[in-house]
Amino acid sequence: MKIVSRIFIALAALSMCMAHVTPAFALTSRIKDIASLQAGRDNQLIGYGLVVGLQGTGDGFRASPFTEQSMRAMLQNLGISTQGGESNAKNTAAVMVTANLPPFASPGSRIDVSVSSLGDATSLRGGTLVMTSLSGADGQIYAVAQGSVVVSGFQAQGQAATLTEGVTTAGRVPGGAIIERELPSHFKDSVNLVLQLRNPDFSTAVRIADVVNGYAAARFGGPVAEARDAQEVVVQKPRVADLTRLMADIENLVVETDTPAKVVVNERTGTIVIGADVRVSPVAVSYGTLTVQVTELPQIIQPEPFSRGVTAVQPQTDIAAQQNGGRVAILDGPNLRTLVAGLNNIGVKPDGIIAILQGIKSAGALQAELVLQ
């Protein structure tokens, strides 16, 4: 079956320009939900360890020799001699352990860790992570992980079939790492607070600075915030203010957020996300699909009795063409609801809507950024 999709999009001369439209949705958020403190960022940790207690689903020592070397080294550190002994039991797996060290974490607190197989193990279900040190980018050990591995997937295998659900070679150890070293922090010694927007935007940064200055004028008698760019807002510490209390008050202030108009398209999954401020100038859209089906039905021709002939194959081909759609619709999207209703009225599937949006962007009628994933 061969499918040829034809999409015709013509820019209609219905209007020369569109009037300025105010945002349809004005959303407010707390500063803590849209910005983070520059001095309070996460740090990534990594480590190499062993998962034991597997039911024959671990690494094969021939395909993963580093697993056997690691197991021998661990046993030697425990005072057990392994010279002259060989083991073929596949109940051990080498894994990489990763975690995120949260800001201001203190020694003794626990964090979750992720465990991923490094060798040819088929499943980590039922295994236990042996004590593993987690290091940062500076090579220092900041946490130690150990505990039972939780795997969400499963695998069932027989002689002629295998059923796998999810990923069985990766899992998590909830609260499996204990922080041993505290990150150096100079928060109390800082002279200012730097707020970083998670979604950089000049309008939102200016509004954050205005809201903070309004709070500071009533509390301290003057402005303290300045929007440095689209991502950073700097708040100067007043002399009489405690930095921790100041941050606690600022992060709960409510700000009206703003985002640029975007249309995000994922062609692999057929997912379309249209922002609230997306606008479409008037266009005429025609969508139609031409389906061509080619079917081969060869016939076997037998020779007549006693004719000394040979069996022959006579080809026979049936071709059918079907034309669907072809309706012309006018799209005029002054707001999100009207745009979605217009796309639905055309009666096409998500893959067709993706092609239509790409065509509208090429015609210059999509007043938004088109992001293809």
Image: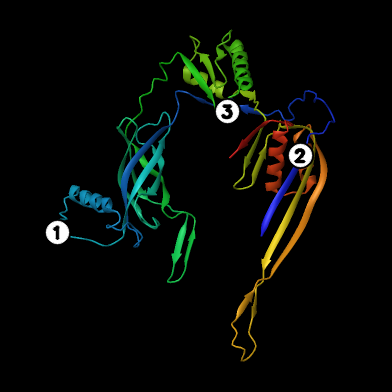
Q: Residue 283 in the image: state x and y as whole percent.
A: 79, 35
Residue at image point 42% right, 50% down:
171
Residue at image point 49% right, 55% down:
166
At label 3, the amino acid type is Asn
At label 2, the amino acid type is Ile
Of labels 2 and 3, the one closer to you:
2
Q: Residue 5 in the image: state x and y as whole percent.
A: 71, 49
| 38, above or below 373, in the image | above
On residue 84, which mark appears?
1
Q: Would you call the spot at circle 2 few (<14 residues within 10 Å), some (14-19), or many (20 or more)?
A: many
At label 1, the amino acid type is Gly
On residue 199, which mark appears?
3
The residue to which callout 2 is attached is 9
| Horizontal relation, residue 222 to residue 346: left or right | left
Residue 335's quadrant in the figure? top right
> Which mark is first along the chain, 1 or 2?
2
Q: Would you call the spot at circle 3 few (<14 residues within 10 Å), some (14-19), or many (20 or more)?
A: some
Report, in whole angstroms, how far the alpha carbon at label 2 lies from the one at label 3.
33 Å
Nearest the eye: 79 or 203: 203
> Which mark is first along the chain, 3 or 2?
2
Residue 91's quadrant in the figure? bottom left
Report, in whole angstroms, how far the alpha carbon at label 3 lies from the one at label 1.
60 Å
Numbered disc 2: secondary structure: strand
Nearest the eye: 197 or 64: 64
Numbered disc 3: secondary structure: loop
